[in-house]
Amino acid sequence: MNFLEAKPPIRLVIFDLDGTLVDSAADLRLSVNATMHHMGRRPLDEETICSYVGKGAPLLIRRALGEGTSEEEAARGLRFFLRYYWDHKLDNTTLYPGARKTLEWLANGSGPRRRVLGVLTNKPVLVSRDMLEDLDLMHLFRFVHGGDSFANKKPHPEGIESILADTGIPASEAMIVGDSDVDIAAGANAGIWTCGVTYGFGDLRLKENPPDLVVHKLPELAEALR
């Protein structure tokens, strides 16, 4: 069913974080390459690193370190990365244009315009919440869940299903917004509406796994939900 034709009453909007609300590519690249240096590896380019983002920090570091990396090396690299990234997560990271205005419009509207907002990311939850606090966005979200909040990360539907149960909002009135096929697959697996953003750095697969809605900037989402 075409989303714009169906115009379902969306009451819950779940956002991905990296590549959807914040442009964190530079700080992720610098943190990964600091880890590579610490581990005696050669640096990687930003495109390669961004292609590894989206499925959680452990897999990001394992893929960056490459084949043949031992469990002990991967664990040591992950510890260093998490410490380094915590200290440098907002050195260069910024909100995407229109993100704050869109979130405020969705969260602060009256009557049917007011939506429940949340974040479901595969980034660790503590660093995600700290980032949103520093960006003065945390108050707009009823919940923020990370890749370590549940037993399974996206694209598994567990996180979304937990959010639906907690809010009491039916799947037919919920949407996930993300820049990656991981987000779209998670939404499809949970039976909710999906929105793909084209400006991020995720692997959005518009032909193989098309979202219900595609936007090129976040204010377009507000227009679609108006």
Image (cartoon, rainbow, N blue to C red):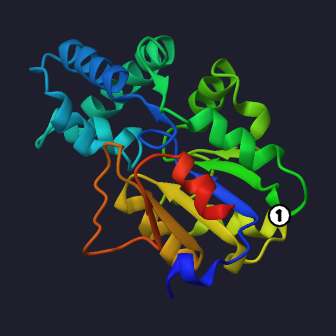
Give whichever of 158, 79 is nearer the camera: 158
Q: Is residue 216 above or below residue 47?
A: below
Q: Tell me which residue sits at (65%, 36%) in the image.
A: 101
Residue sitting nearer the eye, 35 or 221: 221
Q: Amino acid at mark 1?
A: Thr
Residue 202, percent from left and from top:
32, 49
Question: x, y percentage for residue 81?
Answer: 37, 22
Q: On the rendered image, what quadrant is the C terminus found in?
A: bottom right
| Residue 149, above or below 22 | below
- Badge 1: few (under 14), some or many (20 or more) residues near its Cα, within 10 Å? few
The spot of residue 218 in percent (x, y) is 52, 46
Which residue bears the numbered disc 1?
167
Is residue 126 shown left or right of residue 155? right
Residue at image point 27% right, 24% down: 29
Name the residue located 26 percent from the left edge and 75 percent from the top edge: 208
Residue 145 makes an appearance in the image = yes
**Secondary structure of the residue carrying numbered label 1:** helix
